[in-house]
Image (cartoon, rainbow, N blue to C red):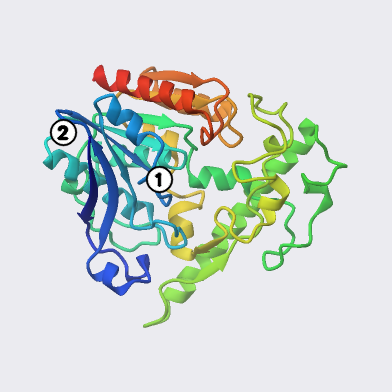
């Protein structure tokens, strides 16, 4: 088995993409390739910010004759200034790197938050339409940056960062600058509201979530416009979004039921994670918010998947506490009849300590790839 660190040169983005001057001037992304002899098919496992160089699928896929590249974007470990429009350019550099090595077929594996990323990538690879980032700045995407892949595998895939924020943002927040005060009528952690949660409470809760997110979105767009109206003024600004992990499904397993353990999230107890100083989307910028978390983000996974034409393997982990059956159904509808649906029974989001399920998943991906 050949193992190789992938050192891939990518186009320079904004200076704020990294605090490293050297990386800004000579930008590279990194990955780990596990390559069996004679392989003609390769897979890329990717996420917008997580380090997938040690992903649990790399070795199992390579043992089954598929070269597997765990690839990172330039935003590894820091999504505060992440632009999805630049992240897909990084993924394209990885696809081109594998094509140059002679691999005839390439499967994009979008794991967790990587699902929406690979869907956006393939949609743009099949029909490029992006020429600016959501804040209006030009982005140098050209067709050659985005070579088409041959198939997509979605593994415990979220619908997208903007969709997560819509379903997870806490509507009980009453002060965007102070995470402590709470509106008891909208507080899912107030035992007077549940669990179990009434239909009436859930309807009010979801409406209030969308209202809070829309309020932040208007503030972001207005602030950015004011800043950029000043000659030689700043082009961006950092800010904090408090309490971003409040999904009633985490406390009430009767909502969108699967095999998950109630009272959990993928990172720990919901209340603690909701108030955590480093939870989802906590630290961001005006431009990063518009690209990732805004209702106007281009990162809606199912919407992008519907614009692709390649075969799809859709993998559901039935004990997942963050990707629910309704999400899987939305992916399936977007695929319009071309999805092969696999259930990993009892699998949690990360398949922690579930080696037999990892092997089953690798078998299914290898079989899927062999049929391309």
Query: Which residue reaches farthest right?
Result: 192
- Left or right: residue 213 versus residue 39 is right
Identify the secondary structure beneath mark 1. Answer: loop
Residue furthest to the bottom: 232
Q: Quadrant of residue 147 in the image?
A: top left
**In-front residue for pair 88/231:** 88
Mark 2 secondary-structure assignment: loop
Residue tagged 1: 47
Task: Give the image quarter of residue 252.
Answer: top right
Q: Quadrant of the C terminus?
A: top left
Residue 146 appears in which quarter of the rendering? top left
Where's residue 324, x and y in %?
58, 30
In the displayed structure, 260 sits above or below 114; it is above
- Tell me what residue is drawn at x 33 percent, y 63 percent: 137
Dot placed on the residue nearer the N-terminal end, 1 or 2: 1
The residue where tag 2 is placed is 103
Q: Residue at x 25, y 19 (%)?
A: 370
Does 272 sit above or below residue 42? below
Residue farthest to the front, as pictured: 1
Does residue 309 appear anywhere in the picture? no
List x then y, in percent, for residue 30.
Answer: 28, 53
């Amino acid at each position: 088995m050949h193992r190789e660190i992938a050192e891939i040169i990518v186009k320079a983005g904004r200076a704020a993409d990294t605090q490293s001057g050297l990386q800004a001037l000579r930008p590279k992304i990194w990955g780990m390739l596990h390559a069996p002899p004679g392989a003609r098919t390769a897979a890329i496992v990717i996420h917008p910010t997580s380090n997938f160089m040690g992903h649990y699928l790399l070795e199992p896929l390579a043992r089954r004759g598929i070269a597997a590249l765990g690839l990172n974007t330039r935003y590894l470990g820091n999504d505060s200034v992440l632009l999805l429009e630049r992240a897909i350019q990084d993924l394209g550099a990885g696809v081109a790197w594998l094509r140059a090595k002679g691999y005839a077929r390439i499967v994009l594996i979008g794991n967790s938050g990587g699902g929406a990323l690979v869907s956006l990538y393939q949609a743009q690879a099949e029909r490029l339409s992006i020429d600016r980032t959501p804040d209006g700045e030009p982005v140098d995407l050209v067709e050659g940056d985005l070579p088409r892949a041959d198939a997509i595998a979605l593994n415990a895939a979220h619908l997208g960062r903007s969709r997560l924020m819509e379903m997870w943002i806490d509507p009980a927040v009453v002060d965007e600058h102070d995470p402590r005060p709470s509106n008891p009528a909208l507080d899912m952690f107030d035992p007077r509201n549940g669990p179990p949660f009434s239909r009436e409470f859930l309807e009010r809760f979801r409406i209030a979530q969308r209202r809070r997110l829309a309020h932040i979105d208007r503030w972001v767009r207005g602030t950015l416009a004011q800043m950029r109206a000043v000659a030689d003024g700043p082009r961006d600004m950092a800010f904090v979004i408090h309490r971003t992990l409040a999904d009633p499904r985490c406390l009430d397993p009767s909502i969108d039921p699967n095999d998950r353990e109630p009272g959990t999230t993928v990172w720990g107890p919901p209340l603690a994670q909701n108030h955590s100083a480093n939870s989802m989307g906590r630290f961001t910028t005006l431009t990063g918010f518009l690209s990732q978390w805004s209702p106007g983000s281009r990162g809606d996974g199912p919407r992008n998947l519907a614009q692709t034409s390649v075969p799809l393997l859709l993998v559901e982990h039935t004990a997942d506490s963050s990707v629910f059956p309704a999400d899987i159904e939305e992916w399936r509808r977007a695929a319009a009849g071309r999805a092969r649906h696999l259930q990993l029974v009892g699998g949690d989001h990360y398949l922690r300590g579930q080696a037999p399920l990892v092997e089953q998943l690798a078998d299914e991906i290898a079989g899927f790839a062999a049929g391309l």
